[in-house]
C-alpha cells in the first residue's frame, strides 16, 4: 500500500476505533494481536513497557527524590535498590536516609562521614545486631574459676575484672582471655575498686584497705566504721576516699594518710552505695565542676558537697515515697547531670539541676523483681532472677534479652555489675564487644556474659 493510501486508511481506522466502546476496542486489539507476528509483538512489548512502567523517580529533582526516600521503611528501601541500576545508584547516594535508619536502630552517627555507601553498610550490620538481640543470639557466656569461697565484690574497668572473696583474696582477671593477672591476699571483701597501681577494698571487718598490685603489700588502712563497709569510691586528684557502711554513716577519708576527714550522718539504714562525681550542671546548691557525693540506703538518696568542712550539710534528700513504703535498690547511677535509681515501683530519673523527677520507667516485667545495671542515652541494661534485658529508652520497649543461671543474690547489689557501658549511649559497631554482665555464682565462680562477634 502506498504511503498516501496507508495514511488515509489509518486515519479512517483511528476514527472508527475512537467511536467504539471499551469492550469493542479490547476485542479489536485482541484480534490484531492474534494476527501479529514476532516482529509486531516485540514492538508492542517495547512500547507498552515505556508507557506503563514510567520511572517517576527519574522525573523528580534529586533533592525531592531524597525527601521521598526518607518516608520508606527499611525493607521497602532495600527492595527499591533492586528495581534497576539507576534506582540503586540514587538510593545508595542518599546519606541522610541511611544515617536516619541507623539512628532509629540506636546507632551513633558520625556526621563527618558523608559516604552513603558506608552508612548503608553500617545499617545492614546494625540491623543484624538488633536481630541477634531479638532472637537471643547476640551474647555468649564464659566463667572465671579460681576462688575457693563465695565472691561478694566485683569491679570492672578497661577489660579487667576484679573479684573479692571470702577466701581472703582479691583477683584481677583479663576478661578477654579469662586469665588471672594478679592475685593478692586481703581481708574479706564486701566491695572493691582498683586502678593501674592499687586496689582499695571495703570489708566485713569494718575496715578499708589499700593494696599495691605489684607487690600485694597493704599500703594504707582506714579504721573508724563500726559496721561492715558496703561501698567505696575514691578520687586521686582530690586525695579523697568515701565509704558507706552498715553503721548508717558515710565517711570521708584522706586517701594518702588514711585519716578520717568527715563523718556524714543522717541515714537510718545501711548505706549500700556511695558515688563520687563532678557536677556538670548549675543550681542554687552547686556549680559545674563541684564534686558531689551521693549516698544511698534502703529508702533515701542523700546529696552531699565534697569539702573538708567538719559540719558538712546534706544538700538534698531524694526518695520515691514520703512514708518510706517503697524501697530503693542499691543500683545508683549519676553522670553529673542526672541521678538514676531503680526501685520497687520502677526506674526513677532525677534532674540534678532541679532535683525534680523527670522520668519514671515501669518495665513490662515486675518492677519489684527487676534491677538496674546501667542507664544510658539510648539503652538501659536490666535484669531479674532469670534474664538480662536490653531496653530501648526512647520507646521503653525491651529489644533483647538473655537467659541467666541461678546466680548468687545480694541485697547490697555488689555481686553483679555491667561491663562495657559506652554502647548504652548508642552502638557504633565497635563498642558492642567485650563484657556485658558479670555475676558471682554459688559455686564461687564468676559468670560472664559477653558480646558475640557481629558477623
Image: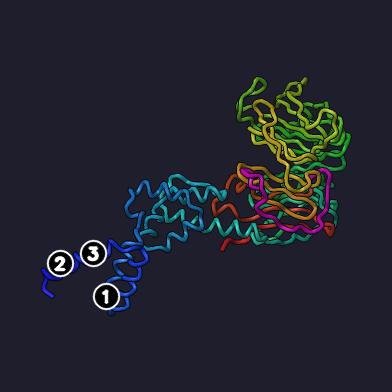
Q: Residues within 10 Å of mark 3 (few under 14, many from 20)?
A: few
Q: Name the residue under label 3.
A: 14
**Above or below: residue 83 compared with residue 65:** below
Q: Quadrant of residue 200?
A: top right
Query: In 3D space, how far apart are the residues under numbered discs 3 and 2 (Cα atoms)?
Result: 10 Å
In the rendered view, does 337 fall on the left or right side of 183? Answer: left
- Give the residue displayed 22% in from the left and 67% down from the top: 13
Horizontal side, residue 324 vs residue 99: left or right: right
Q: Position of residue 188 (x, y in %)?
A: 84, 47
Question: At x 67% / y 21%, what residue is drawn?
Answer: 285
First-in-chain label (1 vs 2): 2
Query: In the image, which is nearer the foreground, mark 1 or mark 3?
Result: 3
Q: Mark 1 points at which residue?
A: 40
| Residues at marks 1 and 3, CA–CA distance in whole angstroms | 18 Å
The span picked out in magenta is: 391-414
User: Along the line of sight, which residue is nearer the eye, 376 or 3?
Assistant: 3
Residue 132, how many percent across, how many down?
62, 60
Look at the numbered disc 2 and give the secondary structure of its residue: helix
- In the image, residue 354 sits, relative to residue 255, either above or below, namely above
Q: Name the residue under label 2.
A: 8
Q: Say few, some or many: other residues with alpha carbon within 10 Å of mark 2 (under 14 / 14 to 19 / 20 or more).
A: few
Q: Where is residue 165 in the image (x, y as percent from the top left)?
A: 82, 51
Compared with 214, 15 (above or below) is: below
Marked residue nearer the N-terminal end (1 or 3) = 3
441, 373: nearer the viewer:
373
Tell me how far mark 1 sits from mark 2, CA to CA: 21 Å
Residue 336 percent coordinates (x, y): 64, 33
Residue 362 visible in this rendered orientation of the protein: yes
Amino acid at each position: 500500500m502506498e504511503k498516501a493510501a496507508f495514511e488515509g486508511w489509518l486515519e479512517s481506522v483511528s476514527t472508527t476505533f475512537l467511536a467504539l466502546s471499551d469492550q469493542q476496542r479490547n476485542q479489536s486489539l485482541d484480534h490484531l494481536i492474534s494476527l501479529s507476528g514476532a516482529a509486531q509483538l516485540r514492538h508492542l512489548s517495547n512500547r507498552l513497557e515505556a508507557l506503563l512502567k514510567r520511572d517517576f523517580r527519574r522525573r523528580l529533582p534529586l533533592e525531592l527524590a531524597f525527601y521521598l526516600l526518607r518516608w520508606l521503611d527499611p525493607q521497602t528501601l532495600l527492595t527499591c535498590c533492586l528495581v534497576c541500576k539507576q534506582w540503586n545508584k540514587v538510593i545508595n547516594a542518599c546519606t541522610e536516609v541511611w544515617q536516619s535508619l541507623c539512628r532509629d536502630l540506636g546507632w551513633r552517627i558520625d556526621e563527618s562521614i558523608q559516604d552513603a555507601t558506608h552508612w548503608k553498610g553500617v545499617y545492614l550490620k546494625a540491623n543484624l545486631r538488633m536481630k541477634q538481640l531479638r532472637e537471643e543470639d547476640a551474647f555468649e557466656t564464659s566463667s572465671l574459676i579460681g576462688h575457693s569461697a563465695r565472691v561478694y565484690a566485683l569491679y570492672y574497668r578497661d577489660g579487667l575484672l576484679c573479684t573479692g572473696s571470702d577466701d581472703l583474696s582479691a583477683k584481677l582477671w583479663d576478661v578477654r582471655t579469662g586469665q588471672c593477672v594478679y592475685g593478692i591476699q586481703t581481708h574479706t571483701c564486701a566491695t572493691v575498686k582498683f586502678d593501674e597501681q592499687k586496689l582499695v577494698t571495703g570489708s566485713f571487718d569494718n575496715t578499708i584497705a589499700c593494696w599495691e598490685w605489684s607487690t600485694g603489700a597493704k599500703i594504707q588502712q582506714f579504721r573508724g566504721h563500726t559496721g561492715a563497709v558496703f561501698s567505696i569510691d575514691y578520687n586521686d586528684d582530690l586525695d579523697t576516699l568515701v565509704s558507706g557502711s552498715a553503721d548508717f554513716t558515710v565517711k570521708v577519708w584522706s586517701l594518702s594518710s588514711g585519716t578520717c576527714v568527715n563523718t556524714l550522718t543522717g541515714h537510718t539504714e545501711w548505706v549500700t552505695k556511695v558515688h563520687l562525681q563532678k557536677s556538670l550542671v548549675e543550681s542554687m546548691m552547686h556549680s559545674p565542676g563541684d564534686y558531689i557525693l551521693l549516698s544511698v540506703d534502703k529508702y533515701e538518696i542523700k546529696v552531699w558537697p565534697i569539702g573538708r568542712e567538719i559540719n558538712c550539710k546534706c544538700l538534698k534528700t531524694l526518695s520515691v515515697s514520703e512514708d518510706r513504703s517503697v524501697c530503693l535498690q542499691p543500683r545508683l547511677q549519676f553522670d553529673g547531670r542526672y541521678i538514676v535509681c531503680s526501685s520497687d515501683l520502677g526506674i526513677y530519673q532525677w534532674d540534678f539541676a532541679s532535683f525534680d523527677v523527670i522520668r519514671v520507667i515501669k518495665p513490662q516485667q515486675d518492677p519489684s523483681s527487676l534491677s538496674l545495671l546501667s542507664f544510658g542515652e539510648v539503652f538501659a541494661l536490666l535484669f531479674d532472677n532469670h534474664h538480662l534485658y536490653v531496653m530501648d529508652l526512647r520507646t521503653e520497649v525491651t529489644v533483647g534479652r538473655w537467659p541467666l543461671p541461678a546466680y548468687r543474690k545480694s541485697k547490697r547489689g555488689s555481686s553483679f555489675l555491667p561491663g562495657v557501658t559506652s554502647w548504652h549511649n548508642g552502638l557504633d559497631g565497635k563498642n558492642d564487644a567485650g563484657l556485658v554482665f558479670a555475676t558471682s555464682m554459688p559455686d564461687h565462680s564468676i559468670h560472664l556474659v559477653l558480646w558475640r562477634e557481629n558477623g
